[in-house]
């Protein structure tokens, strides 16, 4: 039987919410990554976090039991620097709002990073840093208002942590957008450059993007023209999936990365009808009844299939088994 990995020659893993939560490993993630390697598929770790260098990401992965090399890491800082390097002349001045890792990436593509606005600023690049303050945004504001090209590493509004969701780079980008009336070009997910660069680095023709966020990981995969698998270990919820816009809909759904270790067939993980559940839609209301011992994740796959093709405004159970399954997904 053909498996999902037989369809793809590389797996592009998101990190936070997919492989780990901050400094806590997600159960089964390390084994899943190892299994993908054992199957001879290239592995890439693709992160919108621009605060860490590839070496720091490798160190972080090692701390949660995942082996990786720096050449297997693709960050939004690298993607932003590559974008700047493609369009700006050598040694052009770029005002950096972000960590020293972002400074290093800008320098690596032959540009001259600075921290203060001046007459020679060609561009502003903005990535997440916990040390970004009003003064940093003020310098960037002056440069953008003076006509500098503005590139954001990513626009994630939040950043996952052990304490919960914290302000991400997108929150700081929003502040600068409000102050300048300008929108940045975005290098990271949900735009295509980061994922395409990662796929090219793996020499992949049919990569699979795996992530936990519809608005970044899955939307980025759609933008890049790649197939995608969403896992329910991070931000995405069943409710979000049912309401997902066309540009944020995954091809496959799994509870977590252990689905990759089971060598499941593509049809087992695909969004679409699945045995064990019957769904009828009338007047925008979907009624779910059980048909045997159905898998709760299969229920979401099946519901997404119906919700994405028909107008579904509410979901209700038709029997006790369906009621318990829907309650487990907060859909009642």
Image (cartoon, grey):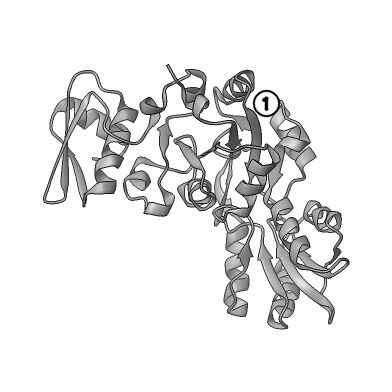
Which residue: 74% across, 77% down? 143
Residue 164: x, y in percent?
A: 54, 44
Q: In the rendered image, is residue 48 in sight?
A: no
The part of the image, by quadrant, that contains residue 108 is bottom right
Residue 7 lies left or right of residue 82; in this view the side is left
The part of the image, by quadrant, that contains residue 242 is top left
Which residue: 26% across, 34% down? 326
Q: Classify mark 1: helix, strand or loop.
A: loop
Q: Which residue is mark 1?
A: 66
Query: Which residue is situated farthest in the front direction here?
Result: 205
Q: How many marks?
A: 1
Residue 124: x, y in percent?
A: 73, 69
Q: In the rendered image, is residue 66 in sight?
A: yes
Residue 325 lies left or right of residue 257; in this view the side is left
Q: Quadrant of the N terminus?
A: top left
**In-front residue for pair 292/111:** 111
Residue 48 lies left or right of residue 247; in this view the side is right
Residue 145: x, y in percent?
A: 69, 82
- Local packing at callout 1 (Cα closer than 10 Å; few below 14, some 14-19, many 20+) is some
The part of the image, by quadrant, that contains residue 265 is top left
Which residue: 59% across, 40% down? 16
Residue 106: x, y in percent?
A: 81, 58
Q: Quadrant of the C terminus?
A: top left
Above or below, 53 against 186 in this view is above
**In-front residue for pair 272/174:** 272
Which residue: 59% across, 23% down? 36
């Amino acid at each position: 039987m053909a498996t999902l990995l037989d369809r793809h020659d590389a797996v592009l893993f998101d990190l936070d919410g997919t492989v780990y939560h901050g400094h806590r490993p997600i159960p089964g993630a390390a084994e899943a990554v190892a299994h993908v390697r054992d199957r001879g598929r290239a592995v890439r770790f693709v992160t919108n976090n621009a605060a860490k260098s590839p070496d720091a990401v490798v160190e972080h992965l090692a701390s949660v039991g995942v082996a990786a090399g720096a050449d297997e890491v693709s960050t939004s800082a690298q993607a932003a620097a590559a974008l700047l390097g493609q369009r700006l002349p050598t040694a052009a001045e770029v005002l950096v709002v972000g960590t020293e890792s972002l400074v290093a990436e800008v320098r690596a593509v032959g540009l001259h990073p600075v921290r203060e606005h001046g007459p020679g600023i060609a561009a502003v690049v903005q990535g997440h840093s916990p040390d970004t303050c009003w003064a940093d945004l003020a310098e960037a504001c002056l440069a953008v208002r003076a006509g500098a090209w503005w590139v954001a590493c990513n626009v994630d509004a939040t950043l996952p942590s052990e304490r919960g969701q914290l302000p991400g780079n997108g929150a700081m980008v929003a502040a600068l957008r409000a102050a300048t009336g300008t929108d940045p070009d975005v290098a990271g997910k949900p735009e295509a450059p980061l994922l395409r660069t990662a796929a090219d680095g793996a020499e992949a023709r049919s990569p699979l993007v795996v992530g936990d966020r519809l608005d970044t990981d899955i939307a980025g995969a759609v933008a890049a023209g790649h197939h995608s698998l969403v896992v329910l270990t991070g931000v995405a919820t069943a409710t979000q999936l049912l309401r997902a816009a066309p540009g944020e809909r995954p091809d496959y759904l799994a509870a977590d990365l252990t689905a990759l270790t089971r060598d499941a067939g593509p049809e087992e993980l695909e969004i679409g009808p699945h045995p064990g559940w019957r769904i009828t839609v009338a007047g925008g209301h979907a009624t779910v009844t059980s048909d045997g011992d159905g898998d709760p994740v299969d229920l979401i796959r099946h519901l997404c299939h119906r919700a994405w093709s028909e107008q579904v405004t509410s979901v209700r159970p038709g029997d006790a088994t369906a009621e318990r399954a829907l309650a487990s997904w907060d859909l009642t």
